[in-house]
Image: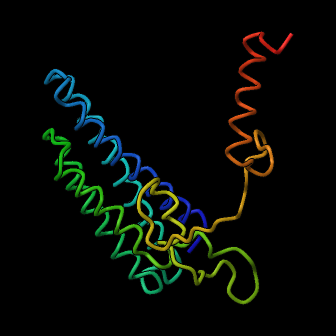
Amino acid sequence: MPPSLVLEVLQVLEGEINLREDTRVAEQARPALKADEFRKRASGLSTSQDGFRDRIDKVVDRIKQLPDGEEEFGKEIQLLGAVSGVMSEATDILAKPETGGPAIAAETEAIELLLQSKRINPKGGGGGGANPGGGGTGKTVDSAMALLGSGVNQKEVREDRGISQATGESGPVLPEEFRAGLDEYFNKLERGGGGQ
């Protein structure tokens, strides 16, 4: 698949993730907003959602225009068609105006469908040879997880690299009896009673 189409889908994915966050914020702000203000905010979210749906529809059209596009990318066309349908539902839900569970669920479903595509892969493409720009072998889910922001990543591997604080370290810890004596000494110095 051409890199421009992959990039467009990834940008829509990022936009959809941000839209879902904006929807959550709108739902949290709902009690503090007047009805007209809330309706206006939800309408803006609905317009944004419809814009993402339109972009996905254009990607599908561009894939179909590729040589053997419908045969070679049939699965992706079907998947992006499902994304468009879910985005259309989310547009209608937001237009009601509804920013609660149903809207967030529809947006989440669109995100999950976008993540399912195996060929829409930021690691693939590029290069020349017999199969120029020809698909990758990585999984989009791994790369796109970075776009999801904070949360639980079940494939996360944490590693302690033994980095220590560079400032404020004073070497080995002294025994308690020496620390008490030093504290008393420095306290006397600070009070001006340094034995003069």
How many numbered badges does the structure rendering display?
0
Name the spot of residue 194 as percent of width and height, x first: 82, 15
Can you say whether 118 is above or below 50 in the image?
below
Can you say whether 183 is above or below 20 in the image?
above
- Residue most extreme to the right: 196
Can you say whether 23 is above or below 86 in the image?
above
Name the spot of residue 24 as percent of width and height, x first: 28, 43
Q: Residue at x 50, y 64 (%)?
A: 144
Name the spot of residue 133 as percent of width and height, x first: 66, 77
Q: Residue at x 36, y 47 (%)?
A: 51
Q: Residue at x 77, y 44 (%)?
A: 169
Q: Quadrant of the N terminus?
A: bottom right
Q: How is the image coloured?
A: rainbow
Name the spot of residue 149 as percent of width and height, x first: 47, 53
Q: Nearer the viewer, residue 92 or 195?
A: 195
Judge from the rendering whether residue 103 lies leftward or rightward of residue 179; answer left or right: left
Q: Residue at x 40, y 74 (%)?
A: 116
Q: Quadrant of the C terminus?
A: top right
Judge from the rendering whether residue 171 lies leftward or rightward of residue 62; answer left or right: right
Judge from the rendering whether residue 22 lies leftward or rightward of residue 145; answer left or right: left
